[in-house]
Image (cartoon, helix red, strand yellow):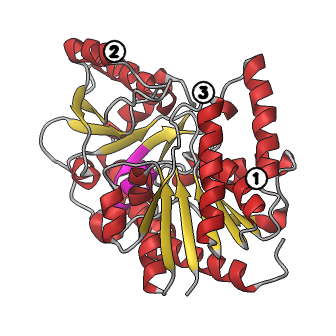
Amino acid sequence: MKTLLFVVNSPEFFVSHRMVIAREAVKQGYSVHVASANGNAVADIKALGCEHHPVDFARSGQNPLTELKALRQLIRLFRTLTPDLVHLITIKPVLYGGFAARMSRVPAVVAAVSGLGTVFLAESGIARLRRVLVQGLYRLAFSHSRLAVIFQNPDDRDMLLHAGALSRGQVRMIRGSGVELEAYPVRPEPKKGKAVVVMASRLLRDKGVLEFVEAARILNARGVPVVMRLVGDPDPGNPSSVTSEQLESWREEGIIQLPGFSSDIAEEYGKSNIVCLPSYREGLPKALVEAAACGRAVVTTDVPGCRDAIEANKTGLLVPAKDAVALADAIQQLVENPEMRAGFGLEARKLAERVFASDIIVARHMEIYRELLTDSRLG
């Protein structure tokens, strides 16, 4: 029996984005372990038959002593558990886990780069210096002799290849985390009343929340018959989060609906006509993959990750990032063209079945695991 250890910041993220992979690994006879911060979703991980190991990953990463503690915990865990393969997910686990795997002589490593983070968005002098530092950390993390790095979009891949962080032979491409199609059925669009546009996301500025709200103002001023729903909660641990004061002012303004967090995104999309995600950069956003499965036309931004989750002018429309007017224009176009929406929705579901189905994503991961565990030529 091979021991597989997933390392991820948050147990909630693991359950929502990687649980299907763990479930298949258990089915195929792996002894599956998960290392993450503590959280309510740990119970779901244990219920699957996986063993959980707490690691003190901090949200903000501002305290060097706290970060060093997490690194030491990983090294200790790797040396004690002696996994055959570690699968590192999200930025800190990839950077810290890659170094820890080398120190602990872990035989094989999978690193999942599901987005490069806000450090690759900012353009200030300090941000550029931080970017150079982070690229150096990626080079260190990816120096393992038996390594596969999974990218969700070609822009992230090319950026780290250009930085010399890894070789082309280490690259694997998998478009997103997959979607269980049966859990996201296609439902007919609501026919009565105004068209409903849903944005379901963490309420972060770099997700395009401010542009979504401004687009709602523009559409209201134009008299476009549309309901704009912003589904999600703020993330107080994230410096990009909108504030409770902003939410309260939007409620008072009455320009958008703010239902808060929803655990049933399929239901939210089923009650919508259009899905919107005006993010500044993504790995490959699960929100758009789920929208495709639900057969919904989307409006999103022409940025890494978002543009890779749709087929432009076939399943959705692309607009420039940080452009509320262009966003409003695209939403209005779909509101006023139900036949276009319907056509986009049909093609979106086909895209989900062809590319994003969880069975396809899981099978690809299992191939990579077998490849790393059996092929001594990798490196």
SS category of the residue bearing label 1:
helix
Residue tagged by mark 3? 62
**Who's the residue at 27% across and 16% down the image?**
250
Q: Nearer the viewer, mark 3 or mark 1?
A: 3
Q: Residues within 10 Å of mark 2 (few under 14, many from 20)?
A: few
Mark nearer the N terminus (3 vs 1): 3
Residue, x 85% and y 81% (percent of image)?
377
> Which amino acid type corresponds to the residue marked 1 in the rendered image?
Ala
Q: Find the magenta span and give its range.
A: 286-298
Q: Nearer the viewer, residue 262 or 19?
A: 19
The image shows residue 141, relative to residue 131, as above or below, that is below
Residue located beneath label 2 in the image: 246
Residue 122: x and y, percent?
A: 67, 25
Of 169 and 196, which appears nearest the observer? 169
Q: Residue tagged by mark 1?
A: 141
Mark 2 element type: helix
Query: Residue at coordinates 48% horizontally, 74% vertically from top-left?
Result: 32
Task: Name the image quarter holding the N terminus.
Answer: bottom right
Q: Name above or below for residue 321 compared with residue 90.
A: above
Which residue is found at the position 13% from the left and 37% from the top? 193
How far is mark 1 from mark 2, CA to CA?
39 Å
The answer to whether residue 118 is seen in the rendering is no
